[in-house]
Amino acid sequence: GKLYTNSINSVEFIPAVLELTSNQDKTKFDDVNTTLRIETDIPFESSDIPYISTLTKNTSICTDYSGVSNVQDDFVTLTIDGKSLSEGESVSFSNFNLNDGDNKYSEHDIILSFQSFKDITTAGQAERCNGEIEFNIEVDI
């Protein structure tokens, strides 16, 4: 059969930019949901094409009011379709789970959970935090 090694057209989060809100007692950020969407040029009638999704980056940096930034370890916990995934870990899927009538694509539920504000390590009081998450998707042949 045809090898669909270079068949991933795009990998994106929908929504891509996540605005965080504090929980009611202002102790942490609420969990936030996004969708990981993987588009391919694999014809939808193809047999199952397994693939591997690797969390290649999960970084959080918080900055205090004097402008000093600190990397935060394990500030964000991530699940993909309910399965917990740490930076460097992978999860396998047996097939792309959707199609648009022409090609296969997949959508996965991503939930980000946050440590409490008291666990943030900055020299002074934390003013803001930002972070970045990246996935690498490989067709598993």
Image: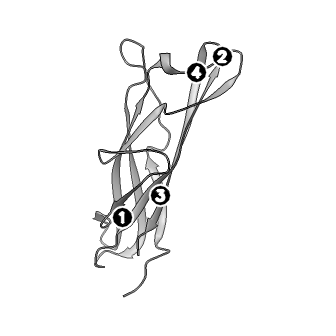
Q: Which residue is mark 4?
A: 121
Q: Which residue is mark 3?
A: 11
Indicate left or right for 20 with 95 as reference. Answer: right
The answer to which of marks 1 and 2 sits earlier in the sequence is 1
Q: Which of the 4 image quarters holds residue 111?
A: top left
**Label 4: how many Cα within 10 Å (few below 14, some 14–19, many 20+):** some
Tell me the residue that label 2 is attached to. Answer: 123
Tell whether 58 sits left or right of 25: right
Q: CA distance from mark 2 to mark 3?
A: 36 Å
Do the residues bearing badges 2 and 3 touch, measured as CB atoms within 8 Å? no
As drawn, the label of residue 126 is none
Q: What's under tag 1, amino acid-wise?
A: Tyr
Circle 2 — which element?
loop
Measure how far apart labels 1 and 2 are at the Cα level. 45 Å
Rounded to the nearest angstrom, the CA distance separating label 4 from label 1 is 40 Å
The image quarter containing residue 124 is top right
| Residue bearing the label numbered 1 | 105
- Location of the N terminus by quadrant is bottom left
* Display colour scheme: one colour
Mark nearer the viewer, 3 or 4 = 4
For mark 2, does the 10 Å Cα neighbourhood hold few (<14), some (14 to 19), or many (20 or more) residues? some
Q: Quadrant of residue 60?
A: top right
Mark 4 vs 2: CB contact within 8 A: no
Q: In what element is the residue under mark 4?
A: loop
Nearest-to-viewer mark from 2 and 3: 2
Q: Residue at x 46, y 68 (%)?
A: 8
x and y percent of residue 20 in the render?
46, 28
Q: Residue 67 appears at what percent x and percent y?
A: 71, 20
